[in-house]
Amino acid sequence: MRYIFSMPSPTYQYARYTDWIEQFCEEKSRSKAKSTEMYRDVIIQVQQILKKYNEDLIGYEADLKNDHKQ
């Protein structure tokens, strides 16, 4: 998680590297295009992992701020 957090974003459009993944999943989950059940399940799993990543990220960012204060 820390490695991914420290990676630069792919473009200036995003603040973090993972921001494009979240946007991609949201667009695909809203898409009206026909997709397989397995494809939809993978998108849901990725969204769940990203949710956990974002929850863990809050604690990691707090640790970084505390390190910088010291």
Image (cartoon, helix red, strand yellow):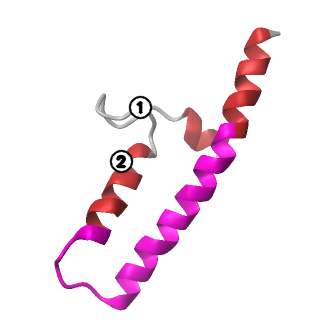
How many residues crowd mark 1 within 10 Å: few (<14), some (14–19), many (20+)? Answer: few
Under circle 2, the secondary element is helix
Residue 22 placement (x, y as % from top left): 40, 54
User: Which is more toward the observer, 55 or 3?
Assistant: 55
Q: What residue type is disc 2 on?
A: Trp
Q: What residue type is disc 1 on?
A: Ala
Placement of 35 over or under 30, stated as above or below:
below
Residue 70 placement (x, y as % from top left): 83, 9
Q: Is residue 2 magenta?
A: no
Q: Say which residue appears at 51% left-offset and 35% top-offset.
A: 7
Disc marking residue 15: 1
- Residue extending farthest to the left is 33
Boundaries of the magenta span: 29-58
51 displayed left or right of 63: left
Give the CA separation, mark 2 to mark 1. Answer: 9 Å
- Residue extending farthest to the right is 70
Under circle 1, the secondary element is loop
Q: Say which residue appears at 26% left-offset and 69% top-offset.
A: 30
Residue 45 placement (x, y as % from top left): 51, 72
4 displayed left or right of 64: left
Placement of 53 over or under 13, stated as above or below:
below
Q: Is residue 33 magenta?
A: yes
14 displayed left or right of 41: left
* Circle nearer the N terminus (2, 1): 1
In which quarter of the view is residue 6 placed? top right
User: Which is more toward the observer, 47 or 11?
Assistant: 47
Q: Say which residue appears at 64% left-offset and 49% top-offset.
A: 55
User: Which is more toward the observer, 25 or 10?
Assistant: 25
Residue for badge 2: 20
How many residues crowd mark 2 within 10 Å: few (<14), some (14–19), many (20+)? Answer: some
